[in-house]
Amino acid sequence: MVMDETCRRTFAEVEAYLDGDLDQDACRRLEEHAARCSVCADTVQRLRRTIGICRDAGRAPLPELVRQRARDAVRRLLTEREPSRGMAPQGKKS
């Protein structure tokens, strides 16, 4: 299928559509087009699933070992960047 101007507009608006940020008229036009265009319908459906997977993954708790490693890495970074009283930061010589 050749993409026409409506397909291009659909691709440009699909993110706002899936986020619920389009007005009713724009939603209606997009849905009507997707009902006739299998390429756009497939794109909308695939993106909807992808967004759902990403949202679900963001809710999953991290294992404690991963959380501890992240905390340790942040502490190391803060310590390395924190100048000691009158001394150069760790790893650098004055």
Image (cartoon, rainbow, N blue to C red):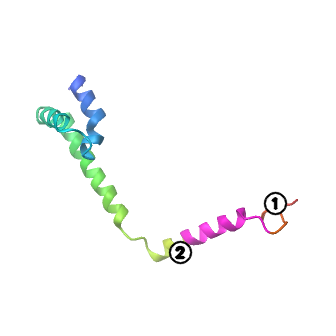
Residue 89 image point, x, y percent: 78, 63
Residue at image coords 66%, 68%: 76
Q: Which residue is mark 2?
A: 68
Q: What's the distance in space between the residues labelled 2 and 1, CA to CA?
A: 27 Å
Badge 1 density bin: few <14, some 14–19, many ≥20, Cα 10 Å = few
**In the image, residue 22 above or below residue 92:** above
What's under tag 1, amino acid-wise? Lys
Image mark for residue 92: 1
For the C terminus, the image quarter is: bottom right
Image mark for residue 5: none
What's under tag 2, amino acid-wise? Gln
Q: Is residue 15 magenta?
A: no
Residue at image coords 85%, 66%: 86
Q: Earlier in the sequence, mark 2 or mark 1?
A: 2
Q: Secondary structure at mark 1?
A: loop
**In the image, residue 45 above or below residue 5:** below
Residue at image coords 30%, 57%: 53
For the N terminus, the image quarter is: top left
**Magenta-drawn stretch, dominant element (helix, strand or loop):** helix
The residues colored magenta run 70-84
Residue 31, by quadrant, is top left
In the rendered image, is residue 39 in sight?
yes
Give left or right: position of 62 versus 41.
right
Residue 19 image point, x, y percent: 27, 47
Give left or right: position of 63 versus 16.
right
Viewer-side residue, 3 vs 26: 26
- Furthest-front residue in this view: 23
Residue 17 image point, x, y percent: 24, 41
Asked if the residues shown at circle 2 and circle 1 are in contact, with their CB atoms under 8 angstroms apart, the answer is no
In the rendered image, is residue 2 in sight?
no
Residue 83, by quadrant, is bottom right
Give left or right: position of 32 versus 77.
left
